[in-house]
Amino acid sequence: MNILTPPIAFLLYLLLVAILSGLGRMLAGAMTANGAKTETYSGGEEGPTSAAAPGYRPFFTVSLFFAILHLGVLMLASSGLTPISGLYLLGLGLVLLALILG
């Protein structure tokens, strides 16, 4: 039986992580309740009270841009150097431009 087979290696790593986590908990001191420990670290500054980006629209725009870009490049990479692929590249560029300009 080889210890590098994925199921056995996974179990060994799981055991190693459990041992290291247990050792870390033994070495760590007792936690005392403190308001500063439960706040987000921000370099000594107060945290923002409002959301950085209101809503998911900017995220969806960026994710759609990269999805179209990556799928378009995969389609071009799997095709030959033909006039149709050049037309496809032009259309891909126009779609990405329209997405950027919103």
Image (spheres, rainbow, N blue to C red):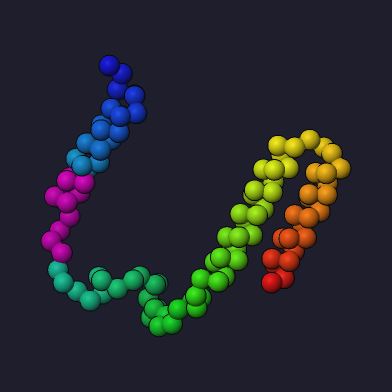
Task: Answer left or right for 82 relative to 4.
Answer: right
- Residue drawn 86% across and 43% down? 83
**SS majority, magenta:** helix
Q: Would you identify the image quadrant in which residue 43 lies?
A: bottom left
**Residue 100, placed above or below residue 91:** below
Residue 26 position within the rendered picture, expressed as x and y whole percent measured from the top left: 13, 50
* Number of numbered discs: 0
- Residue drawn 73% across and 42% down? 76
Q: Which residues are magenta?
A: 21-31
Residue 86 position within the rendered picture, expressed as x and y whole percent measured from the top left: 83, 46
**Residue 38, placed above or below residue 28:** below
Locate the N terminus by quadrant: top left
Residue at the right extreme, as displayed? 83
- Residue drawn 21% across and 46% down? 21
Task: Answer left or right for 94 relative to 41.
Answer: right
Task: Answer left or right for 24 relative to 44.
Answer: left
Front-lying residue, 99 or 28: 99
- The verdict on residue 33 being magenta is no
Residue at the front extreme, as displayed? 84
Front-lying residue, 19 or 11: 11
Residue at the bottom extreme, as displayed? 49
Locate the C terminus by quadrant: bottom right
Q: Would you identify the image quadrant in which residue 94 lies?
A: bottom right
Residue 19 position within the rendered picture, expressed as x and y whole percent measured from the top left: 19, 40
**Residue 3, placed above or below residue 97:** above
**Residue 31, placed above or below residue 10:** below
Residue 29 position within the rendered picture, expressed as x and y whole percent measured from the top left: 15, 58
- Residue drawn 15% across and 64% down? 31
Task: Answer left or right for 95 relative to 67.
Answer: right
